[in-house]
Image (tube, rainbow, N blue to C red):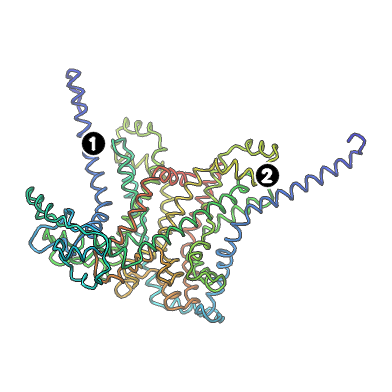
Amino acid sequence: MTAVSLNAARLRRGKRLRRWFANTGWYVLLISFALVTVVPFLWTALMSVRPNSANIFRQGRPPEIIPYPGLIGWGYGQNEARRDGSYTALPWDSSLPEGTRYGWWRDFTPIFSEWFKSVGLDQFAFPATTINYYRVWTDVNLPRYFVNSFIVAVSVVFLQLLTCSLAAYPLSKMRFRGRDAVFYLILSTLIFPEQLTLIPTFIISVNILGLANTLQGLIIPFGTNAFGIFLLRQTYQSIPDELIEAARIDGASEIGIWWRILLPLIRPGLATLAIFSFIGSWNSFLWPLLMIRQEQLYTLPVGLAFLEGAFTGNLRTVAAGIMVATVPIIIVFLMFQRQFVRGLSGAVKG
Amino acid sequence: MVSTPYSETFKALEAGRRRRERNRLLVAYGFLAPSFIFFLIFLIIPLISVVYLSFTNYNIVTTPQWVGLENYVRLFQDPLFWRGLRNSFIYLVVTPILIVLSIWLAIVVNRKLRGIFVFRTIYYIPAVTSVVAVGMVFELVFAEPNGLINGILLALGVIKSPINFLTHPDSTLVSIMLVTIWRGIGFYMVIFLAALQAVPEELYEAAAIDGANRFQQHLYITVPSIRPAIIFVAVISSISALKVFEEIFVMTDGSGGVLDSALTLMFYLYRQGFVNLNAGYAAAIAVVFTIVTLGFSIANLRFLERGTRDSR
């Protein structure tokens, strides 16, 4: 970049232009990587709104990649729609019982197919449908799995916040015999991969505690978390000792100090731990797979994994199930992303 | 107080001090008790019993029978165990790839560009979605012949027949490793980004004056400055690579791949323990697995411990 003498206005414009060009390369890079990240999800989303044909790629024709509102609706109202001709029955729908219909179905295809023809995109466009979501919501007990996952994740979060914040307090703010030994003992449990204890933990939970086929069985074994204790201990250490001393002189009990003074102050640490344990529990797969045999008690990942068995060969319904399972957690992440990233980098620096 | 002899005051004080100390000890361990109970039942007792179980013949229902070293002897003659061990170590290849890619991406998103925050957020999305969901998404991406990749390549005429991502013994493990890399980059990027932001800007300016190009700057300034983060990522990603299970389970539909080609140690443990109900044998796998990963785990622990000392 050579310096050229120009008048001020041209220089400014040139600079802005040059900066834009200099950054374009970066944006191309950023956008292409964003595509690598997002396209698999978009692909799944596209599959999930496909009507009767699973194949987006067709022999000798352009791929159908632009969805437009087609048959949209919920409930058994499709029977009615089928009767008045606004809906073409799909082969596997014939099993639906007559007279159990409710809800509505609306065929938007005529309007939008016209519109796409007029702009010449009709080759690439296809009418989207909500039928796969409807099927995954009714034929499989997905709402139930959702609720189960939520109950388990929220309970694990509360239990871990309670036990970890209790345990981390004396480890960072009290002087007592054996403190360092206890701390290093807790830390050293991180050496052992959880897989080592998988079998005995399973045996204890099932044979001794009778937790098989219960949601408690997915909660209680995760009652505390060595990493969480470690994390909260770091957070406690940022609180000045004088504050606690002052409260002790005022005659506050230790539990009172913990509850009224410290917990409000360690909220950022608690938020970090809550997010991580929520995600961990929400996404955990192996343990619920082992513990739960009853279909009504499946959590979302387990239900999802068995979806393929339930809809053999029907990839569109499976895709709808994946969307139902992932979109909420992505929304939660987008809502709390600041705490997320701060928590993650804090945990690393810590 | 004045009338009491000095020694008695001292005794009273001493007794008071002891009482307070006892109280403090009681209070401290009271706070620790809830966690301790969970650790005892779900960690300490299982730790001891897994070692015991590994010397027994046990099918979860009947009582365990002591068989001595038999499980271990069988294990070392078991070709599937060696296959699992080999595959778990092959899986370690994801670690260097993840480190290089995520450092590179962290450097890119560390630039002050408009809207960079949006990109950082997008890159992190795979890390919050479950392995099961991601695995199933990639089953759709890898599908034959109309999955995302095969469909595009076939339509463009790049390939004549679909690539057997998940249906050929030679490619299954590699395909699953690709998914692990895809899912991990954003997560490790955030870690490296935090480290990068602590590197002082002046270092780069000085290097630029000395005539270092951008690549040299990163090689000689960035990499040494974020070394702790690199070690940290290397440790945690190797541990999670060695213990990979869910990806394998989901993407091979619980089979371990064609001809057990994607069988890892953890998957073999699951199969022996919970499918074939050889809990004693599976316990032996768990013990061997722990010994194999111990080096990485201790490195991890030392890292956390050093962090503790620094913050004091």
Residue in view at x 32 percent, y 48 percent: B123
Q: Chain of mark 1?
A: A
Residue in view at x 38 percent, y 43 percent: B193
**Image coords of residue A268 (percent x, y):** 49, 43
Total marks in image: 2
**Image coords of residue A289 (percent x, y):** 42, 68
Q: Secondary structure at mark 2?
A: loop
Say the numbered circle drawn on residue B144. Answer: none
Camera-nearest residue between B294 and A202:
A202
The image shows residue A156, relative to residue B8, as above or below, that is below
Query: The C terminus of chain B is located in which quarter?
Result: top right
Camera-nearest residue between B31 and B77:
B31
Query: The N terminus of chain B is located in which quarter?
Result: top right
Q: Amino acid at mark 1?
A: Asn
Horizontal arrangement in the rendering, residue B155 relative to residue A206 (left or right): left
The mark lying in front, picked from 1 and 2, is 2
Instruction: Of the two numbered discs 1 and 2 on the same chain, state the one appearing first in sequence.
Output: 1
Quadrant of res A89: bottom left
Q: Which residue is mark 1?
A: A23
Q: Secondary structure at mark 1?
A: helix
Q: Which residue is mark 2?
A: A253
Is label 1 on the same chain as label 2? yes
Camera-nearest residue between A1 and B197:
B197
